[in-house]
Image: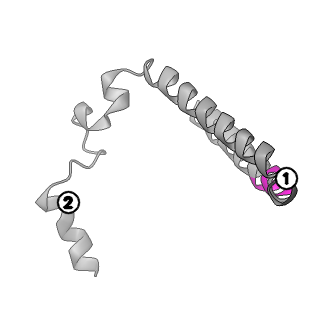
Amino acid sequence: MVGQYNSAFALVKQLALAVGPAVGGPMGAALHVPYIVTFVLFSLGMTVLAVRLGRRLSPVQNQPSLAKSPVVAQGGPAAAEPAAANA
């Protein structure tokens, strides 16, 4: 599952880097109102999708620190010390 997620993410990222400037640049330069409307519609669509998918998460998936796993950093003074030592 992790490999499939990573490959899908890489595909979407590469498509966005290739198609985004090719479409958004000329559209933003010449068609101001459709550009803004498209931007707002896509932003609202992503927000709705994120909220709907977020409701499907379990509490531990939504907040990994609840899992009490040593892999997930818990924060606090002890977590800040290594960063200060590297400075």
Residue 55 on image: x %, y %:
43, 19
Task: Provide the secondary structure element on which disc 2 rests.
Answer: helix
Q: In the drawing, does residue 48 fall left or right of residue 23?
A: left
Q: In the drawing, does residue 51 fall left or right of residue 10?
A: left
Distance of label 1 from label 2 (alpha carbons) = 46 Å
Q: In which quarter of the image is the N terminus?
A: top right
Q: Residue at x 71, y 46 (%)?
A: 36
Residue 87 on image: x %, y %:
28, 82
Q: Which residue is drawn at 76% across and 55% down?
A: 17
Q: Residue 79 carries which label?
A: 2
Residue 19 on image: x %, y %:
83, 50
Residue 85 lies, with reference to residue 52, above or below; the image says below
The secondary structure that dominates the magenta segment is helix
Task: Provide the secondary structure element on which disc 1 rests.
Answer: helix
Q: Residue at x 77, y 46 (%)?
A: 33
Which picture quadrant has residue 64? top left
Q: Give the range drawn in magenta.
A: 17-23
Q: Residue 60 carries which label?
A: none
Would you call the spot at circle 2 few (<14 residues within 10 Å), some (14-19), or many (20 or more)? Answer: few
Is 11 part of what is drawn in magenta?
Answer: no
Q: Name the residue under label 1.
A: 27
Question: Viewer-proximal residue, 22 or 67?
Answer: 22
